[in-house]
Amino acid sequence: MRPVFLVLFLTFTLLDFNAGHILPGAAEVGSRKQKVWARAGSSVMLPCYLSHRKMGKSWKQLPDKTSVLWKRLGGSTHQQPHVVLEVEDSGLRKTALPMRPRVSLQDSALRNGNFSLHISPVRSEDAGLYEARVVHNTKVQSCHVELGVITVTLSPPSPVVANEPLLLRCNSSHRASLVETCWFHNGRQVPTSGSLCSSHGALSILRPAMSDAGSWRCQLRYSDNEIISATYNLQILGFEGPANPVVYAAAGSAADLPCTLSYLPSAFGTNVVTAQWSRLAGGHLQDGGISHNSSSRSFPFHLPAVGLGDAGQYHCAVSVGSRTISRDVTLAVITVTPSIQGPVSEGSHLLLTCSLTHRQGHEHFQWKQLDSAPTNSKLAKATSHNLGGHRFQMGPTLEIPHVSQKDMGTWECSVYGPEGRLGTVEYGLQITGAQVSSPPTIFSGQVMFGLTVTFFLLLTVCVLALALKKRARSPAFPALDGMVAIAMPRKKEVEEKQKEKIHQTEC
């Protein structure tokens, strides 16, 4: 059984030693040298634990008189050994000036045999060999840990602006020659082709997009089969949403043009941000500037009532520190043009055309009747099957061949795209003579017939009344009714005859 235990012991010892170059191990005092890798800018722990076996029965709590001294034995920039951190048995602490206050030991851990050194944040010049010397109960033991540092640099420095080239460079303090570099974005390995180019530990992104933001991990493989990796969280300063957004708004309605940053300005170390909107109209630049602090990343432009003259392109420019980014936003206005202006007579042929400024080519239209004139419930059920073409119709033009009472009300034209409904506009159809409380159209013929009969009856009564009135004014002597009208001679002729008679008498 002893050979088996010996083989297992040697196997786990070798695995622990080989794994130390990737993840922090648990180095015991007096054990072999361990190696720990850390990314510059992160935190790291150099492990050093007092062996429970060597401490015997007193392992649960160390005596008060215990001291520890961490030294750096050598590195890329510091070849001479120097003190990093010392804790005397009296509790007095001494820290080297270059690493203060980045190094520390946990007091609670010291009494349990944990003498690990914490460094935060790690710098590239911290790479090298460290030794911990622990003195307790007149016994002196030591830990040796080699710290390797991986450095990931970004050029140009943050913030990175969308569509501007960037370079991610990954290197380490390892002295062997670099054989291969692999890059992973959000956990998936990316091919270095097209807009991505990898060479000697560097990754070039020619036109970074908002989709390139996130976690990037570089994996370095060296000639001695050492594999090292580091992660960098890439933040790209840009705008949320599509690259060239289009806002669809109905004429007369309010509209908000979006301008929202991908991150808060405070994430890039700035407290002041300025947003400026402009529009080229009639050859003159009309500007509107807004200043905000770093607590906001949204800077919309509000239009209280949209008209056809407001349609067009708008420009939003946001300055974050010394960097300025901009985007264009298009305002498309939806209108309805009727073939008959004003109230429409019943029975007319009506066309309603839904128009859109600045079409992108992928839009389609749908007409829908939202409400109509109140009708009898039974009648509504009887006629609902005959409203198909009027209740719902595709295309920019709605045709109503014969306008009737059921067509009166609000019609809605919706504009759709691949992403769903983009905008709507409403049109109120009014019919001449139509009343909200008017009876159903099915009874209109009977009403007209009744009105016609009533009119003729009234006319007959009037004629009879006039005849009776005329008869009441006739003479009271019946004999006079049979008199025949005789033509009376003219006055001049009568006078001449009288003169003639007088002349004859004188003779």
Image (tube, rainbow, N blue to C red):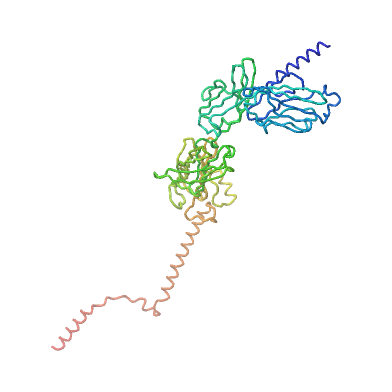
Q: Nearer the viewer, residue 159 or 493?
A: 159
Q: Nearer the viewer, residue 395 or 76?
A: 76
Residue furthest to the top: 3
> Where does the image place residue 84, in percent across and percent down from the top left?
69, 28
Answer with left or right where residue 57 lies relative to residue 353: right
**Relative to 57, is 360 above or below?**
below
Q: Nearer the viewer, residue 480 or 495?
A: 495
> Where does the image place residue 278, in percent across and percent down from the top left?
46, 43
Residue furthest to the right: 57
Residue found 63% across the figure and 20% down from its top: 174
> Where does the image place residue 381, in percent across and percent down from the top left?
59, 47
Residue furthest to the bottom: 506
Answer with left or right where residue 481 lies relative to residue 423: left
Q: Quadrant of residue 497?
A: bottom left
Answer with left or right where residue 174 lies relative to residue 492: right
**Relative to 494, is 219 above or below?**
above
Q: Nearer the viewer, residue 181 or 176?
A: 176
Query: Where, quadrant-wise, is the N terminus in this rendering?
Result: top right
Number of marks present in the image shown: 0
Residue furthest to the left: 507
Query: Where, quadrant-wise, is the C terminus in this rendering?
Result: bottom left
> Where does the image place residue 275, in percent across and percent down from the top left?
51, 43
Residue 28 shows in the view = no
Q: Quadrant of residue 200?
A: top right
Residue 40 shows in the view = yes
**Relative to 67, is 355 above or below?**
below
